[in-house]
Amino acid sequence: MTKACVDNIKVLIIPKIKDPRGNLAVIEKDIVPFKIKRVYYLFDIPSGSYRGGHAHKELSQFVIALSGSFEVVLKDREKTKRVILNSPTKGLLITPGIWRELENFSSGAVCLVVASDIYKEEDYIRDFKEFVDYNK
Ligand code: TYD
């Protein structure tokens, strides 16, 4: 894993095609710097729910609040950063080696995740101490 830093984690604007019939937003290769291999989403999230609580060794993810809002807590070995996602035209690009926690979901929130690879449990680090050690 390359040395990861929360300062490099950015919110990117997703281009929008405005239309009186309803807006349309597109995520394609100009937006995310990886080949998209998987898309999944969290929905029907009970209030007070907490998701994430892990890091990935290789996986990059682009996280969007398709509906409603939620907060993403990002951690590297030293720093913590909190990002609020509340727009379907903004996405958080989380590069490998960053611990993430998702919380404070609004009612009706839908969290879309666009990922650089298929699901691989072996890419997860689910223990925070292991994450800190892994990054040394
Ligand atoms: P996990 O990634 O831990 O969820 P979150 O970070 O949102 O809290 O995944 C929860 C469960 O779902 C876990 O048992 C693995 C499984 N899962 C898949 O089978 N495929 C997937 O693409 C994802 C993201 C999870």
Image (spheres, helix red, strand yellow):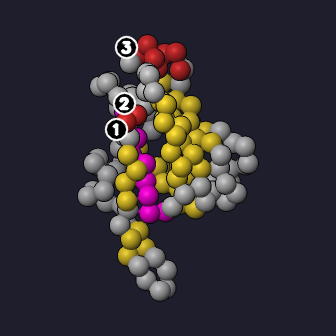
Nearer the N terminus, badge 3 or badge 2? 2
Evaluate if marks 1 and 2 touch, with contact meaning CB atoms under 8 Å apart.
Answer: yes
Q: Which residues are magenta?
A: 88-96
Residue displayed at 38% across by 18% down: 135
* Secondary structure category for the residue under label 1: helix
Left or right of 26, for residue 82 = right
Q: Position of residue 128 (x, y in %)?
A: 53, 20
Residue 21 is marked as none
Determine the CA span between mark 3 and mark 2.
Answer: 12 Å
Residue displayed at 43% across by 31% down: 98
Q: Position of residue 6 (x, y in %)?
A: 40, 34
- Decide if ligand 1 comes within 8 Å of the CB at mark 3: no
- Of residues 110 and 86, the one drawn nearer to the viewer in this rendering: 86
Residue type at tag 2: Cys
Residue type at tag 1: Asn
- Tag nearer the camera, 3 or 2: 2
Question: Which residue is labeled 1 in the image?
Answer: 8
Nearer the N terminus, badge 1 or badge 3? 1
Question: Which residue is labeled 3 in the image?
Answer: 136
Evaluate if marks 3 and 2 touch, with contact meaning CB atoms under 8 Å apart.
Answer: no
